[in-house]
Amino acid sequence: MRETWRWFGPADKISLPEIRQTGAVGIVSALHHVPVGQVWPVQEITERGAEIAAAGLSWDVIESLPVSEAIKTQTGAWRDHLDAWRQSLRNIAVADGPRVICYNFMPILDWTRTVLHSPLSHGGTAMRFDLTDFAVFDLHLLARPGAAEGFPEPVREAAARRMGEITDEQKAGLIANIIAGLPGTDTSWSLDDVRAHLATYAAISPERLRRHLADFLAEVVPEAERLGLRLCAHPDDPPYPLLGLPRILSTLPDYQAMLAAVDSPANGVTFCTGSLGVRPEFDPAEFIGAVGGRIHFAHLRNTRRHPGPVVPLPSFDESDHLDGDTDMVSTIRALLAEEVQRQSAGRADAVIPFRPDHGHDLLSDLDRQAQPGYPLIGRLKGLAELRGVIAALR
């Protein structure tokens, strides 16, 4: 397995020389400054790769080449955005950029948390998703029509109590945490922006969004295969419907349907244990056994669900990498076995790139205020733990 590290480009508060000291050898990055729906220029791809190489690292994975809301909803200039996506693939190949390209098909919001810096007993902080807080946002702050139907009565009652207890400052903080935009971008929305975007999905069912994903893949996967690139879809985070929006990459059957829709080695999976692991039925070894040959990239992190029924989705904390609901040792054992199979088959992509995803803010992280979920010390700790598991299993 190849150790990589996510870097958000020149604006990242963690520098490439610091990443070099973690022991990671590959970089996961993107041209976050290029607006969604526009072509990535060859020169800028080349310059980013050269900047990374000058630090003694290699640009191994693009995360992500964003899929616009127009493509997901098949509205507006979505065909122009498809053309731009395909041209970006060609430019990545011309610039000798990364062969692996991660993307997601989550409607409107990327990963969603209600608390970005929840205090831990040892003095560090972690990200958290609290269902009651999310219900406060959905029911009372966003005031989404029909939102009450998505929450059972005990959750609605708890949200009403909490709404009466929190201050205006806490309400503003909750809104900011949930709609802060995609990590690595400057995009952020107001509540009215969210309402407007939600309206574009009013007539889009999960089945229709699956058709749109299949249509997207039919347009871009053949080009990726021709260019020798591998696309890999990231799962929904958390892997449940939010704000009445459809979620279509949350389970193993979801991924099996996606891979069958366009059956190509270029159509693959970003295996994120933190996202998929929020669901109680998630079995990482089973997942890898079923679709492991199409895993092009792995995000290794862990979460721990709060006790109680999953209605409509569990509250959870970002946990230590080896101390959550996902058995990370069995996960890595299955990934290493998949690599052995690939090596026996003579596959050029036998080594699976992975990165320590998310992490607790620890020590100097608390003062650095890096991208939420992407601290230096916290991820270094996670990488060291994962590296130890890999060494022991080998």
Image: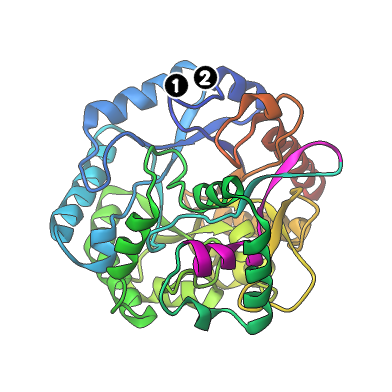
Whether residue 151 is visible to the viewer of this picture, yes or no, is: yes
Residue 33 against residue 261 in the figure, above or below = above
Identify the residue at horizontal 73%, vertical 41% (top origin): 125
Residue 202 magenta: no
Crowding at mark 1 (Cα within 10 Å: few <14, some 14-19, many 20+): some
Rendered image quadrant of residue 29: top left
Rendered image quadrant of residue 267: bottom left
Determine whether the residue tagged by mark 2 lies in a helix, strand or loop.
loop
Residue 391 horizontal/vertical position (percent): 78, 42
Q: Amino acid at mark 2?
A: Gly
Identify the residue at horizontal 29%, vertical 53% (top origin): 224
Q: CB atoms at circles 2 and 1 under 8 Å apart?
A: yes
Identify the residue at horizontal 59%, vertical 38% (top origin): 374
**Closest to the observer: 261 or 32?**
32
Residue 123 against residue 213 in the figure, above or below = above
Q: Which mark is residue 132?
A: none
Cα distance between the residues tagged 2 and 1: 5 Å
* Horizontal relation, residue 305 to residue 208: left or right: right
Residue 124 magenta: yes
Looking at the rendering, the stretch of residues picked out in magenta corresponds to: 122-141
Q: Which mark is residue 53?
A: 1
**Closest to the observer: 300 or 127?**
127
Determine whether the residue tagged by mark 1 lies in a helix, strand or loop.
helix
Residue 332 horizontal/vertical position (percent): 70, 55
Identify the residue at horizontal 69%, vertical 72% (top origin): 158
Residue 123 horizontal/vertical position (percent): 82, 36
> Circle 2 is placed at which residue position?
56
Residue at the extreme right of the image, as rendered:
122
Q: Amino acid at mark 1?
A: Ala
Crowding at mark 2 (Cα within 10 Å: few <14, some 14-19, many 20+): few
